[in-house]
Image (cartoon, rainbow, N blue to C red):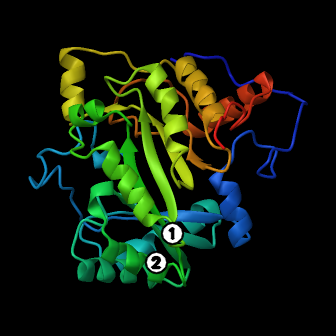
Amino acid sequence: MIESQAPSRGIKKHREYPWGTRRPFNAYKDYLRERFGGRLQKVSVDAGFTCPNRDGVKANGGCTYCNNLSFVPPYCKPGMTIAEQAEAGVEYLARRYKARQFIAYLQAYSNTYAPLPYLKSIYSQALSHPDIQGLAIGTRPDCVDPEKLDYLESLAREYYISIEYGLESINDRTLEAINRAHTFSEWAEAVNMTAGRNIHICSHLIFGLPGDSREQMLETAAVVSQYPVNSLKLHHLHIVDKTQLAVQYRRDPFPVFKYNEYIDLVIEFLQRLRPDIMIQRLVGETHPRHLIAPIWGVRANQVQQHIEAEMRKRDVWQGKLYQGT
């Protein structure tokens, strides 16, 4: 069931915001369209990586909420090479979205968690497709070092390179509880180490993790704004099947976001966020066959439209309450 009313329509009030659009937050997709002169689509490729909290180096079992099968696109199939996945993804997305330019997105698990020679092989395969303009690399903050970043910096002279550090929470107790097996200070160190290399720095946050209060989630905006982050992905907590968190939830259910609660939190968060930080995503989406809770019955694009409409209705925008220098 949908737990909210549809976004308000017919709102005539418009203003142009500091980032040069009429959107009340600084949208990453607008930046990409301006930079590349048109639509740029991410092509997911699975390079078969793992994580140090999954293989026993730092912990076992991975993050308690993680089931990568819940977001793998249909063109990523086992047994395909990186080049074959890139080719299949480009063909699929060109047909579906009429896109002509692409970024190879290494999303599953930690895509810098390997020796540098192996990373060079993987990245070069992904970049070999003529329509792929660069890489978006999802990883953990404890899986980078100066040597790897030096190599990515060299790639960034020719390609668009973005690295996405999973942070999830600024609360070390929460990070421990979800078996992240890294700390906030390790995230801060990785971000500072990456800055100044012409590498786009994105970070991923999950709202609604057990142990994080609403006040802490809002505080995250001010904390993250102190670091040289270029963009953020916001995600509400999903309870998905075949995860440790699903076992915990079924045994002892804990509160998850109601639709309107999440809308309100995101709007309050954005107002406290540094205005030049771009927003890649405002909400997460999981395939319904894997999702246990929360069940909202709306698609991610509808949630974003509702957030935008509600921000205009309230006459608020990203950075309105930002108190940084």
Q: Position of residue 74 (x, y in %)?
A: 39, 57
- Name the secondary structure under disc 1: loop
Q: In the rendered image, which residue does mark 2 sit on? A: 153
The residue furthest right is 12
Q: Position of residue 183 (x, y in %)?
A: 28, 44
Q: Residues within 10 Å of mark 2 (few under 14, many from 20)?
A: some
Q: Spatial distance from mark 2 to mark 1, Cα to Cα?
A: 7 Å
Q: Residues within 10 Å of mark 1 (few under 14, many from 20)?
A: many
The residue drawn where x is 12% and y is 47% is 59
- Name the secondary structure under disc 2: helix
Residue 247 got which mark? none
The earlier-in-sequence mark between 2 and 1 is 2
Q: In the rendered image, which residue does mark 1 sit on? A: 199
Using the rendered image of the protein, determine whether residue 71 is visible from the camera's viewpoint.
Answer: no
Left or right: residue 20 compared with residue 229: right
Left or right: residue 307 compared with residue 238: right
Q: Name the amino acid type tagged 1.
A: Ile
Left or right: residue 47 compared with residue 155: left
Q: Name the amino acid type tagged 2.
A: Glu
Circles 2, 1 touching at the beta carbon (< 8 Å):
yes
Q: Quadrant of residue 46?
A: bottom left
Q: Position of residue 124 (x, y in %)?
A: 38, 83
Q: Is residue 154 above or below residue 230?
A: below
Using the rendered image of the protein, determine whether residue 174 is visible from the camera's viewpoint.
Answer: yes
The residue drawn where x is 27% and y is 15% is 253
| Viewer-nearest residue: 1 or 280 | 280
The residue drawn where x is 36% and y is 15% is 255
